[in-house]
Image (tube, rainbow, N blue to C red):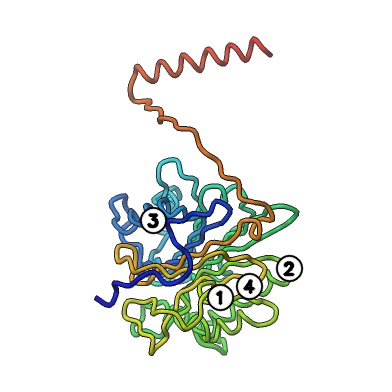
């Protein structure tokens, strides 16, 4: 089986560096049905926890998140027990007729555990096309890092594809461009703005072109942005194919995590294919937390505790009795 491949790179997933922020990028080829029995999301939830992932960028979510209730967030489905997790999503919100839960394209950015305490801002592309979404975190003295997830279009037949959505937007607005160049321009210009302000950037992306010599990769490496794909920053060559139907003769590695040159990467790898969560190889990178936050990441060990069940009268009454006694004590001390 051509998809049974070894890990490629310098990062060993079982070796977790407490001084590093672990970043993962993954094209999911659709998140599937929205329920707790979703095998793909259950597998992803376990991967995030077992591999101690702090930041995750998802591409090709293929979901119309507007069809959900406000309480139904991606983070709520991916939360494992008492995990702290935040999510921001972006998908095409301009086309609203004759669509249900399925919406081609789309991206998500997730932040987990200690990093959620440093969140400064979140956002997505201004035009509602589902090109990218991001979080920013702030550490010491205005030390800001952006984490962006982005999904590049590729030519595909049919009227409901991500590519055709962008094509209709271009035609409606009479823009002198095409979907691929539109994506490249929007992503690079937003990142260039952040870089001009002195901020650091981590880009998790399915670029649908080679990550070393593709048009967008060369633009990201240029003056004013200075970003390189992390696995190829540490290892030589074009890298292995990252789509299950890919080959070294075609685009090779099309998925990656790009980091600005002021971030210190300590390990980066393409993981083996995992068909339970997608048809692309996941990418994983460890970055020293002090280069992201300006300070080491603080690891907080949460105390073990049982959840309160208010449905059992005996437990509920005992709890209320303890709370009342504590309130009496506070009133007495006041």
Are the residues at dot 1 and dot 3 in contact (C-beta closer than 8 Å)?
no
Horizontal side of 242 relative to 235 (left or right) equals left
Task: Work out whether mark 1 precedes mark 4 in sequence or the reverse, and give the earlier one.
Answer: 4
Q: Residue at x 62, y 65 (%)?
A: 264
Residue receiving disc 3: 47
- For label 4, the SS is helix
Residue 90 lies, with reference to residue 188, above or below; the image says: above
Q: What residue occupies the far top of the structure in this picture?
A: 332
Q: Which mark is residue 233?
A: 1
Residue 81 lies, with reference to residue 1, above or below; the image says: above
Q: Quadrant for residue 64, please give it.
A: bottom left
Task: Work out whether mark 1 precedes mark 2 in sequence or the reverse, and give the earlier one.
Answer: 2
Q: Residues within 10 Å of mark 1 (few under 14, many from 20)?
A: some
Task: Work out whether mark 3 precedes mark 4 in sequence or the reverse, and give the earlier one.
Answer: 3
Q: Residue at x 34, y 25 (%)?
A: 311
Q: Residues within 10 Å of mark 4 (few under 14, many from 20)?
A: few
Q: Which mark is residue 197?
A: 2
Task: Work out whether mark 1 precedes mark 3 in sequence or the reverse, and give the earlier one.
Answer: 3
Q: Which mark is residue 190?
A: 4
């Amino acid at each position: 089986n051509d998809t049974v491949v070894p890990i490629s790179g310098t990062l060993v997933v079982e070796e977790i560096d407490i001084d590093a922020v672990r970043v993962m990028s993954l094209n999911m080829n659709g998140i599937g049905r929205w329920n707790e029995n979703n095998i793909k999301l259950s597998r992803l939830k376990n991967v995030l926890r077992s591999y101690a992932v702090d930041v995750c960028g998802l591409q090709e979510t293929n979901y119309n998140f507007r069809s959900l209730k406000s309480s139904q967030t991606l983070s709520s489905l991916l939360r494992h027990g008492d995990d702290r997790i935040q999510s921001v999503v972006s998908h095409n919100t301009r086309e609203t007729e004759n669509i249900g839960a399925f919406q081609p394209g789309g991206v998500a950015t997730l932040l987990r555990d200690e990093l959620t305490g440093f969140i400064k801002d979140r956002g997505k592309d201004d035009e509602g096309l589902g090109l990218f979404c991001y979080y920013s975190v702030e550490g010491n003295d205005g030390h800001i890092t952006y984490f962006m997830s982005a999904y590049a279009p590729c030519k595909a037949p049919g009227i409901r594809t991500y590519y055709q959505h962008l094509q209709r937007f271009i035609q409606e607005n009479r823009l002198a461009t095409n979907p691929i160049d539109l994506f490249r321009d929007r992503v690079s210009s937003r990142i260039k703005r952040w870089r001009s302000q002195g901020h650091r950037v981590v880009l998790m992306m399915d670029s649908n072109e080679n990550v070393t010599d593709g048009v967008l990769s060369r633009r990201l490496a240029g003056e004013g942005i200075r970003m390189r794909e992390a696995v190829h920053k540490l290892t030589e060559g074009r890298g292995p194919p990252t789509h299950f139907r890919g080959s070294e003769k075609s685009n090779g590695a099309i998925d990656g995590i790009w980091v600005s040159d002021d971030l210190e990467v300590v390990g980066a790898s393409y993981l083996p294919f995992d068909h339970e969560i997608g048809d692309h190889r996941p990418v994983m990178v460890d970055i020293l937390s002090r280069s992201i936050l300006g300070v080491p990441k603080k690891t907080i060990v949460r105390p073990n505790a049982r959840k309160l069940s208010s449905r059992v009268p005996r437990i509920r009454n005992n709890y209320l009795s303890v709370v009342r006694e504590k309130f009496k004590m506070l009133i007495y001390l006041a």
